[in-house]
Every structure is written in C-alpha cells, then in structure tokens.
Image: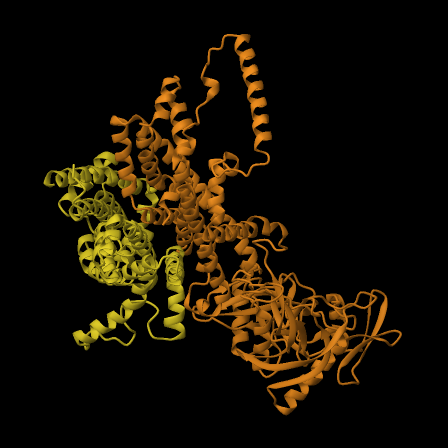
Chain colours: A orange, B yellow
C-alpha cells in the first residue's frame, strides 16, 4: 500500500558534493553518446515487430493515477461519487439558482367565510355633553338613570351623580332619545335614620332653619319655601337613599338646563365613511323633536320624517344623512359602508324580524380579491365590486341581538403544509416554508457539520496519533491511555446533556451549532489517533525513515512530512466513512430536537417537525424524501470510502 | 492468561476513573441555575405534602452531587458513594438510581437479546451466502441491503415502520409497553407477556434492521478471506463436498473474528438502545436515561454514564480475551 511515497525524499535537503565543471562536461558527453546509441537502435528496430517485454509496450502510470484508475473502475464507488456530486450541487449550488429562500414564507388564496359587517341596534346610549363638565365615564350612569326613568313609568325623575355632585332630571324626547337636564340649586342632605343634617354649600348658621323647613317638607307640605339672608329658596326632594338629598333652588335661577343628550339613533352620512360631527348630531336630534330645521356652520338643514327613515336634507333638498335605529359597522368596527348597502341591509334585517327568521341571504356587490390576491380596480382606482351572496345570521349574546353579515371572501393565508404542486414541488411545511428550499439549506448545514467535525477529528487524531506513534515510550502510553479514555466516553449521552443545558440556557441556534461541531470533534478523534499511531509504528522502522533521519531532518518535519503522508490513504478512507457517521449523528440529534434548531434547517429537524402521528401520516411527502436524502448521503460516503480503500490497497480487495 | 486479564482489568479501572472524572466535570460545569430550577420544581411539587423548602432542596441537591465541595473533592465524594453502590436518589423518578435501574433493565435486556439473536440468525448466513456466490445477484443484493441498513438513521427506520405497521396496517401500537385496553390486574401472566411481546416487535425490527448490515458485511469479508486461504483449496483438492468445505472448514474459521466481535457487544445488551427505546417509548434503561438527561437529572445521568463506560470497557476486554481463546495462534502477553 503506502510504498507509493517511500521515495518521497526531499532532494533539496541532500547536499551532493559536485566538483565543478568537469563533472558537467562528462555528463553532457555521456548524454550525447546515449542519444546516438538510442537513435541507431531505433533505426535498427524500425522494421522489426515489438518484443513482448519491451518497456514502451507497458504504459507506466504514476501511483496516484493508478489509484484514480482503480477507483473509477469501481462501479459502486462511481455511483456513490455521482450521488455525492448531485447532492453537493443541490445543496451548495442549488440555493443560488432556486428562487426561494430557506426562511421565505408563502401565502396562498383561500375562500373563507368571513364576517363583512355587523348590524345591530345600539344597546347603550350615545352621550352628547351639552352644558356640563361631566365627562364620558366608564361608569355609565346615563343608561342607568334612563332605565330608572323607564321603570318609573315615564315620569320625570331626578338622580344625583355621587362622583360629581350634579343632579340630573331625566326626560324623554322621543323613541330612544332622552335629555338629562342639569338641575341647579344648593344641596343639603338629611340622614334618614339619625336625622343628621349636612348643610353642604349652605351657610351652617342657618342649620336649624333648614331642618325645620325640611321637616315640614317631609311631612308632605310640598313646595316649601325658606328665606335665608334675603334669598328665597324652594325646597325639593331630589334623591332618596340612606340620606335624603334636598335641593334648595334660589328664586330667579334657571331651574334646569339640558345637561346630557342621550340617544340610540344612528346617523349615517350619505358620503360613505364620513362621520358626522357631534355638533351636527346634537343640532339634528334637537331639531327632530322640535322645528325639524337647524343651522350648522351657516348651512340650513331640514329633517324629512315623512318616509320610513328620517332623512336630513340640505337647502338644495339633497339628502346628506339618514337617521336610523341600526348601527352598521365593518368587522373592525368602522363606519365604512355606503348608504345604499346600509339601507339594503336594514331592509333585509327588518324582513327577517317580521318573518322571525334566524338566517337570510341576499345578493350584493362587495369587494373580492381576484386569483392573484389583488383587488381589481377600475381606471379611477376604485375597487371593482363583485356580486356575491351575503349571509345574514342572527346572533344573540347576553340579550344583545346582532345580525352578522358574512360571505366567502378570498383571503390570503399562510400556505401551511401545502400539497406538492408545480409551485412547490415538495409542498410547504408547517412554517409555510418551501420544502425544497429547506432541503437545500438543510443539506448544506448537514454536510458542513459533517466536514467540520471530520476535519477537527482528523487534525486532533493525526496530531495525537502521530506524536504517540513516533515517540513511543511514555508519550505513547500517555496518549494511548487518553485515547482509551476518550474512546470510552459515550458521545450520544454527552450531546444530549449538552443540548438540554443549551435548551435551558436558551443559547442562540448559531452558537449551539458551533459548540456541537467542536464537541463532536473532541469526542471523536480517538479512532483516528489509533489508526495513525498503528500505521506510524510500522512505518517508522522502514528504511526511508532511517534515510530521513540520516539526512538530519527535524523531528516535526519527519513526522508530518514523511510519515503522515504515508498514512494519508487510510486517513482519507476513514474520513470519508466518518462523514457518513457524523451526518447520521447530527441528523439523529436534530431529529430529537437537540441539535441544530429552528430557523436553521437540517435534514434531521425537518423530519422532527412532522414526527407526530397525524403529521407523519399526512405529510409523507415531506419526511420521506428527506429521510431518503440522509440515507443517500451516508450510503454515498460509504460507497466512496469503500471504493477509495479498494483503490488504495488492491491487495485487500475481496 | 490470568495475568493478562488482571492487567487489563486494572487498566480498565484506571481508565474508568478518568472517564468518570471527565463526565463529572461536565455535569459539574452545568450552570448552577440549572440545579436551582430543579430545586424550585421539587419544592413546588412537594410543597402540598409539607415537603422541604426550596433552600433545603437546593442544599440537598448540591450535597448529593457533591457540588458544594468543589470539583475534585466533590468527585471523590461521588466516587466513594458510587463504590458503595450509592448513586443517590434520582431527581426525576423519585426512586434511587439503582432501584429504577433494576426495574427497567430487563425490558432493555429482553429487547436487546431478541434483536441480538435475530441479528445473528439473519446476518451470518446471509454474509456466508454472499461470500460464497461473490459478484452474483445475491451478493450485490445482500451488500446493498446491508449498506442501506447501515446508512439509515434509526429514527427514519422507526418512523417508516410505524407508518407501515402501526398506522397503515394497524398491527401494532405506535409505542409504549402495553395496549390501551390492557388491564394489568385482570390479565393472566400469559396475556401480559403476549401484550408486551407485541409491543417489542417494532423496536426489535428497527434494531435488527440497523445492526444487521454491519455484521453481514463483516461476515462476508471474513468469509472471503478464508475462502481464499490455502487450506480451503486443500480441502477442495481432497474432494470434500462443497457443503463440507463451506460449512465445516471455512465457516469455523470465519467464526473466529465473528465470535470476537459478538463477544465484545455482549455487555452492550445491558446498555439499552437509547434512541430506539425513546422513539417507541419502551420503558427500558435507554428511554429512562434519555428523559433523565433531557430533564437534567444529574444523579441518574451519572449513573447511566458510569454504566455505559463500564460496559464499553468490559466489551473491549471480552473481545480481547475471546480473541485469544478462540484463536490459539494468538499469544497473550
């Protein structure tokens, strides 16, 4: 085997002592003589048949060419080589030409019945604050006052807002429209049980007078009056509770002013999407139960209540807005629909109510994506509407009735686990990545991990094995015991422990990858060290090493320039076989979720992502090709390794 | 011979000492918050029963693993305990490591033994046949199947087998040791055995499929070497039947390296199949230690790694001894 390189002496190191030009002259003369003899011989043999043992009949090949020739004759090795070339092209050149990236997500178009609009009568009042400092409050006292008012049978009632101290009197303007008047006056409260009087804003020195007046009031003598400091007050009970609150109205003060306007009516502007401002709405609501005319920003509007729906018209008589009982909003809660859709929907809903139906459907033109996931637009840039069947469904949640309008909307969705198609030859995976792109990038990482680890192993192994074999003695013993120790450390468990620590410490995937390669390299060098040592032990006793020593070469040079090259054949074979092993180990680790992690793809974690029973059954088009690729890569490395061994060492062949 | 064995054993002990030191160092280097997390979990889990507090747990865990004493001192503490068979309480299984081991090892051993026997029954005859008819279709088929078996990752074989036999055909369960409808209290021992046996089929098949290739190739190579030997030519020249040549003269000589190899793998029957058991949820030593390792159960991990190292060393020694015993030409020294 390794005798190819026995003559690998470095002649520049061998100092041949020549004695000047005499030698050269002699050499040239000899050469000339040889040439003439050869020419004569050639002329003589020209007409004779070539002899069997003639040197020119045998084509002499250099040792490396012999190896190559033997290798290329081996069919299995060639199959392996071709597979490897294909795999490498796929993994390293493929991504350059493949249109998709490894973390490129894909979307597809799907028809999904999605909600388009919601129609319902507002359940709470819209509050317009007129002559008050009250603010919109989460504690919706307005609704509860109105409820009290309705419970009270429609008679005007007064309520005190405990937080601000304001007193409101609720009155009804029309269906679903109420006014909360702000009641003026100064307050005084009397505890019903202890008769303790709190005079509040009133001067405390008149307490006794006030108590007397209130006692009268309690007795039932209504409309009691009281004169304090020259002012005449009238006393009214405004709120009952643990303390009765009385209001003392000074004479001449306005008793009440409109404080809050509360309404459930909805204003729909006839310009789609336009929201009418609060001022306009207040004016319109006030006018609705009054003169039916109002002026805003110098423009005069009239309200037409003759039709089914109340319409607001401007001076020219064109309808600018409608007042409706129904609020129609988009899914996002925006008021974005035009009046035509709104009135169509209201009509549909009212028919549903009349017929007492839960479901209904109607035809209407709505926005719809085309097959490219875009809206068709006309020349003006407006979305072209497509007639679709819209479904209305009545839903009642917590006493609130709503009509949900939905239709089959073409929607852009992540293409998760898409079946193989021309766009994605192996479909897409659970992250909507293209499987082929993942395979390419994954193969790149798997192969790279294999190469890096094997090179690390080899460098360590050659270094340690070379030293051990060459020096022998205690160096050898020490290194070989170290080899024994490392040979004994189980790789897989160590990698699992390491990975679970990485998991717990949330190490970045890239750092993990580097660590994994380093640790695999450190754990795997012992085999190569043994091989190198064994070879070197037998080689160092041979003549060429004695010659190298005799020429006075340095030790390092002798080991790594003369011994190690002779181990190269075995090294190359074991590296090739080792590559397959490392790829297997890496893919197993990644499969267990302990190796290379998302977002990096490797063949192992691609199979892992579809390893649960359901995915395993349904997505065979993802994991089977990947598994076959792993198998092919490992087989190819084994074939090539086998072929190389046979080529380097024909004696061993079968 | 005895001297050789003693020498090898002593050397193995020294190696084991250093291997365990390296492994102990690795577990010692596990960041301390890892242990803290475990202590917190244990404290939370036992809090309801009025168990120890987090601080007490942390102290106990550190003491158990010798982490509170520093690396070298901690290692010797652990070693001293281990020598007495005290590997400590497993953090995950709430049992002492040795107890958990004795509970699950026979599952692993049974699975390993089944696979081992079938491997021998299938691989050796096929290897012999392939060598006998070198370069025939049989030879190429055997070689290719062997190579595919070597090259396939365990998880892929397991997944394919699960898909075919468990999902498509529905013959076996996808994993676990018992069927869903198996009731341990009412089942007879025969039924219990049958139930477990059914669950061992797929994992055993996986193990056989991935390990068969190596042995087959090894048998074939050795058989070929023997068939080229002079004494085979002599046997043929004597006019012995081909059957006798192959079956008696050639095969017995092929057995020398095979027995050595197989002898070396015998201790491996006790180390369980880490990946296969995990994939099929077979309650064996491999499965148990996989979950111990991924959940950071340091005592059990140390125990398992010690076991693995001992078994590896033992395998080497057995192989060396067998080599000398089987082949009288080899001199021991």
Up/down of A362 relative to A42, above or below: below
The answer to which of A416 and B245 lies nearer the viewer is B245
Q: Residue furthest left?
A: B2
Identify which residue is drawn at 50% across, 34% down.
A55
Q: Residue furthest bottom?
A: A355
Quadrant assignment for the N terminus of chain A: top left
Q: Is residue A157 visible?
A: yes
Q: Position of residue A262 (x, y in %)?
A: 66, 72
The answer to whether residue B277 is left or right of residue A456 is left
Q: Position of residue A276 (x, y in %)?
A: 75, 68
The answer to whether residue B304 is left or right of residue A574 is left
Identify which residue is drawn at 38% across, 17% down.
A552
The answer to which of B209 and A402 lies nearer the viewer is B209
Q: Position of residue A512 (x, y in %)?
A: 44, 45
The answer to which of B114 and B197 lies nearer the viewer is B114
Up/down of A13 relative to A58, above or below: above
Identify which residue is drawn at 48% across, 39% down.
A52
Q: Residue furthest right?
A: A316
Q: How many marks?
A: 0
Q: Position of residue A96 (x, y in %)?
A: 62, 49
The answer to which of A8 and B87 lies nearer the viewer is A8
Q: Is residue A516 visible?
A: no
């Amino acid at each position: 085997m390794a005798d190819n390189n026995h003559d690998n002496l470095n002649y520049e190191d061998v100092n041949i002592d020549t004695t000047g030009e005499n030698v050269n002259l002699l050499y040239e003369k000899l050469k000339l003589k040889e040439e003439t003899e050869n020419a004569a011989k050639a002329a003589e043999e020209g007409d004779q048949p070539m002899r069997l043992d003639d040197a020119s009949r045998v084509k002499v090949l250099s040792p490396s060419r012999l190896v190559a020739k033997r290798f290329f004759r081996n069919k299995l090795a060639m199959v392996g080589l071709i597979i490897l070339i294909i795999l490498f092209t796929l993994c390293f050149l493929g991504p350059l030409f493949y249109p998709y990236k490894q973390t490129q997500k894909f979307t597809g178009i799907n028809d999904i019945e999605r909600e388009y609009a919601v129609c319902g009568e507002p359940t709470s009042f819209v509050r317009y604050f007129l002559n008050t400092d009250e603010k919109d409050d989460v504690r919706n006292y307005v609704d509860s006052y109105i409820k009290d008012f309705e419970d009270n049978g429609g008679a005007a009632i007064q309520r005190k807002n405990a937080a601000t101290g304001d007193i409101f009197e609720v009155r009804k303007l029309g269906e679903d429209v109420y006014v909360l008047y702000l009641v003026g006056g100064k307050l005084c409260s009397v505890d019903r049980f202890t008769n303790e009087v709190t005079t509040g804003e009133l001067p405390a020195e008149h307490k006794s007078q006030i108590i007397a007046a209130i006692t009268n009031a309690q007795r039932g003598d209504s409309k009691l009056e009281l004169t304090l400091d020259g002012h005449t007050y009238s006393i009214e009970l405004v709120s009952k509770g643990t303390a009765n609150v009385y209001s003392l109205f000074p004479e001449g003060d306005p008793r009440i002013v409109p404080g809050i306007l509360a309404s459930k009516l909805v204003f729909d502007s006839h310009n789609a999407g336009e929201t009418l401002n609060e001022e306009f709405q207040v004016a319109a609501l006030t006018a609705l139960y009054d003169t039916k005319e109002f002026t805003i920003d110098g423009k005069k509007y009239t309200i037409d209540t003759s039709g089914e729906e109340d319409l607001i018209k401007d001076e020219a008589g064109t309808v600018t807005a409608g007042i409706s009982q129904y609020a129609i909003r988009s899914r996002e809660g925006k008021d974005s629909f035009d009046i035509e859709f709104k009135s169509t929907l209201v009509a549909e809903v009212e028919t549903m109510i009349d017929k007492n139906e839960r479901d209904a459907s109607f035809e209407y033109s709505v926005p719809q994506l085309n097959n490219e996931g875009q809206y068709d637009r006309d020349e003006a840039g407006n979305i072209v509407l497509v007639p679709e069947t819209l479904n209305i469904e009545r839903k009642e949640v917590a006493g609130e009735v709503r009509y949900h309008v939905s239709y089959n909307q073409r929607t852009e969705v992540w293409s998760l686990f898409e079946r193989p198609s021309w766009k994605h030859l192996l479909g897409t995976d659970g992250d909507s990545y293209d499987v082929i792109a993942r395979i390419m990038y994954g193969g790149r990482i798997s192969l790279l991990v294999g190469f890096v680890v094997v090179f690390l192993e080899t460098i360590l192994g050659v270094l340690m094995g070379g030293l051990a074999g060459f020096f022998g003695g205690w160096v050898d013993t020490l290194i070989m015991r170290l080899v024994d120790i490392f040979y004994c450390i189980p790789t897989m468990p160590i990698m699992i422990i390491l990975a679970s620590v990485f998991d717990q410490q949330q190490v970045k995937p890239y750092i993990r990858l580097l660590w994994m390669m380093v640790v695999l390299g450190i754990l795997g060098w012992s085999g190569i060290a043994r091989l190198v040592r064994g070879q070197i032990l037998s080689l160092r006793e041979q003549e060429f090493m004695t010659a190298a020593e005799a020429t006075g070469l340095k030790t390092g040079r002798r080991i790594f320039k003369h011994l190690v090259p002779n181990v190269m054949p075995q090294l190359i074979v074991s590296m090739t076989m080792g590559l397959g092993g490392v790829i297997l180990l890496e893919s197993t680790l990644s499969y267990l979720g302990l190796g290379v992690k998302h977002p990096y793809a490797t063949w192992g974690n691609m199979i892992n992502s579809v390893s649960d029973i359901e995915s395993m059954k349904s997505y065979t088009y993802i994991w089977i090709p990947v598994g076959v690729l792993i198998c092919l890569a490992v087989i190819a490395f084994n074939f090539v390794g086998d072929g190389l061994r046979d080529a380097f060492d024909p004696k061993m062949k079968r | 011979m005895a001297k050789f064995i003693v020498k090898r054993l002593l050397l193995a002990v020294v190696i084991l000492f250093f291997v365990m030191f390296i492994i102990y160092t690795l577990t010692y280097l596990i960041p301390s918050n890892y242990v803290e997390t475990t202590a917190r979990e244990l404290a939370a889990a036992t809090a309801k029963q009025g168990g120890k507090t987090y601080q007490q747990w942390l102290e106990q865990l550190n003491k158990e693993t010798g982490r509170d004493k520093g690396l070298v001192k901690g290692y010797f503490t652990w070693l001293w305990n281990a020598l007495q068979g005290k590997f400590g309480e497993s953090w995950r299984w709430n049992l002492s490591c040795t107890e958990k081991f004795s509970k699950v090892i026979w599952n692993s051993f049974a699975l390993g033994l089944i696979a081992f026997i079938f491997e021998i029954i299938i691989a050796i005859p096929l290897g012999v046949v392939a060598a006998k008819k070198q370069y025939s279709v049989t030879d190429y088929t055997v070689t290719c199947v062997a190579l595919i078996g070597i090259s396939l990752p365990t998880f892929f074989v397991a997944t394919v087998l699960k898909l075919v036999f468990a999902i498509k055909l529905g013959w076996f369960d996808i994993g676990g040791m018992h069927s869903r409808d198996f009731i341990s209290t009412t089942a007879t021992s025969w039924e219990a055995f049958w139930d477990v046996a059914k669950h061992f089929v797929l994992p055993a098949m996986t193990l056989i499929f991935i390990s068969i290739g190596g042995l087959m190739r090894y048998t074939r190579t050795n058989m070929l070497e023997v068939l080229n030997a002079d004494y085979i030519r002599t046997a043929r020249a004597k006019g012995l039947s081909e059957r006798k040549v192959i079956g008696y003269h050639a095969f017995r000589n092929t057995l020398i390296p095979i027995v050595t190899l197989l002898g070396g793998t015998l201790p491996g029957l006790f180390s369980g199949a880490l990946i296969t058991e995990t994939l099929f949820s077979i309650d064996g030593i491999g499965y148990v230690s996989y979950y111990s390792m991924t959940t950071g159960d340091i005592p059990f991990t140390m125990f398992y790694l010690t076991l693995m190292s001992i078994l590896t060393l033992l395998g080497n020694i057995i192989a060396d001894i067998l080599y000398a015993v089987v082949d009288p030409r080899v001199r021991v020294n």
